[in-house]
Amino acid sequence: MLLRIFKEVVNSSKKMFILNYGLTLLMGLLNAVPLIAMQKFFDSLIYINSDYSAFFYLGLFIFIKMLSYGISEYTNYKYEFYDLTVMGKMTEKTNQKVSGFKPVFFEDSTMMDSIEKAYEGTGRMRRVVDTVMMILLYYIPQIIVTGIYLFMAHPLLPLCIVMMLAVVIITTKIEEKDYIDTEKATSNHDRRINAYCDYIAGIRSFKETKLLGMQGYFLSKITKALSERKIIKKQCIRSIGKKDYLKSGILLFCHIAILSILLLCLGNKTVTIGIIAAVMTSLDEIMEMLEGLMDELKGGISKAIGKIKMFFGIQDVKEEKDGNKKLDHISRIDLRNVGFSYPGQEQPAVADLNLSIRTGEHIAVVGENGSGKSTLVKLLSGLYEPNEGAVLYNNTDINDFQHKSVYDKETAIFQNYGKYELSIRDNIEIGKYGSFENTEKNADKQEMDYKIKTILEEVCFDYNKYEKLDETILGREFGETDLSGGQWQRLAIARGLYRNGELMILDEPTSAIDPFEEERLYNLFCKVMKNKTAVIVTHRLRFTMWADRIVVMKDGKIVGNGSHKELMEKCNEYKRIWEASDICRDGLIPSC
Ligand code: ADP
Ligand code: MG
């Protein structure tokens, strides 16, 4: 695992790796010099009065300190770039991988969770490498050099340092546990506070909260959660404070022990005053170094490893198997005993689906909410792979075709359409970028604008207030303006129509649009579908009149398939839906 992390980080930028960690090693080695310079300085002052060497050592001490400081600042600055480089490369890798996943993966909540953690893992990889490298190249050399120096002064001195190290390790471990326990105990409060703040000030709910006067309620909830959190945190701080006293006491004892040893040695003349001064002044630094080492070790490395594991897990997911045949034209589509269950669901969403569609046919799919209509079209379009049975295009299993060549023949307007926070022009054109590369993108802009405007007019999207189609960014998050649900849906329709595929899939394409416009749009669909194969899911029966055939779904099964007249005679479910519909009540039949 660690090896794999190193490999990824080194491969991200070999140059940066060598530069950063070369400097780290240099710093580790340089840090021992001030200790020796300090000793020599005092010894020169006390024992060799007339010499300039005291100044030399003082100068050396200051020089090395400044050099270390300079290198440390430089590496800190470089680290930021290095971090960004590694993170960028890893994110790119994850993006590439995730965009190749089967669409059905995104229905799986555990998979979604892994993907989220994998993205977090991309930011942690260099931290892990950094921790290991800091320990190997900075702390260990420094500890060895200082240890040897102290051992030469007196063999008992390194023992005192080991004791101090033990105290630091034990207390940080205990403090870490305190922090983790507190974190666990307050995480629920934190989540609640965030949620309540979002209800009051978040884009999605602030209107409702304000109008219905719910702020007071949420504010009091926040106050309560904050005070509960404060009590828990206070206990933690108090407990850590007590342990800190103990830690300081033991460390003070170590300091005194070291000083006593040194003074005894001074009496025996085995150490010089310079050594005592150097050791005493560097004790704080040694402590700082030990605490730094502990920080490196506890800096969430195990948590980071967990997330990095997800990163590798995602990288190791097998690519979607792609067929090798190219689909040139759809002459027929067949579903043979198709069954499908969503990930993690025991009950199949659809089962035993048998359906044949010939080129140019227009099929309407009707049925109650949850009867499996959307699942049917996702299977039919090749977006999801059936768990049972097969989807055939031109009598060949859809999996034998290159996915892209299948998608290129299709266009879709989904029930849950995308709200892309882009310009109007991009919102419409993106549907073509993937399939037709840059040919259309670079076409004459005026002509393109004309085409886009025509489609926008057809779907009744009033673009006049957006001066230039490619300048106003839509949406609230980072756009300048927002659209209503119906306007977003009109854009999705325009995008689907602009793409102009051979097979059109429309899944309740007008759910957010008012009834007057709906009629117009259905007429428009009739027009554009003239020479295409089309499958349209709708729960409004008045719009099934133009279809060649109506497919009725109930509880994940196809329970009817035929013309209105046939279904009225044979299919109870259809009859039931028909009798409950406005078309039956008002006798409104759309013209098409
Ligand atoms: P319809 O489009 O007719 O309303 P769907 O095809 O969306 O129906 O859903 C069919 C069944 O599959 C329903 O029982 C629904 O609860 C279930 N279902 C749909 N999407 C998911 C999903 N992502 N995860 C689990 N079950 C789902
Ligand atoms: Mg649906």
Image (cartoon, rainbow, N blue to C red):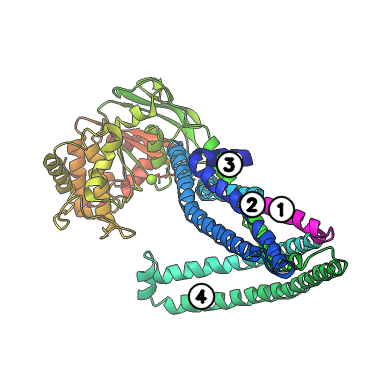
| Residue at numbered disc 2 | 29
Q: Dot 4: within a 10 Å radius of its alpha carbon, few (fewer than 14), some, or many (20 or more) residues? A: many
Q: Measure the alpha-carbon separation of dots 1 and 2.
A: 8 Å
Q: Return the disc, 4 or 2, that comes first in the chain's sequence.
A: 2
Q: Can residue 1 be seen in this view?
A: no
Do the residues under discs 1 and 2 have CB atoms within 8 angstroms? yes
Q: Residue at x 20, y 30 (%)?
A: 531
In this rendering, which labeled residue sits more in front, label 2 or label 3?
A: 2
In this rendering, which labeled residue sits more in front, label 4 or label 3?
A: 3
Q: Measure the alpha-carbon separation of dots 2 and 3.
A: 26 Å
Task: Look at label 1 and name its amino acid.
Answer: Val
Q: Return the disc, 1 or 2, that comes first in the chain's sequence.
A: 2
Do the residues under discs 4 and 2 have CB atoms within 8 angstroms? no
Q: Dot 3: within a 10 Å radius of its alpha carbon, few (fewer than 14), some, or many (20 or more) residues? A: some
- State the SS at label 3: helix
Residue 441 in the magenta stretch? The answer is no
Q: Return the disc, 4 or 3, that comes first in the chain's sequence.
A: 3
| Residue at numbered disc 4 | 222
User: Can you tell which mark lies on residue 5?
Assistant: 3
Q: Measure the alpha-carbon separation of dots 4 and 3.
A: 41 Å
Can you say whether 190 is above or below 393 in the image?
Answer: below
| Residue at numbered disc 1 | 145
**Span shown in magenta:** 140-159
Please identify the quarter of the rendering in which residue 486 is found: bottom left
In this rendering, which labeled residue sits more in front, label 3 or label 1?
A: 1
- Residue 258 placed where, x, y %? 80, 67
Taking the image in four quarters, ligand 1 sits in the one at top left
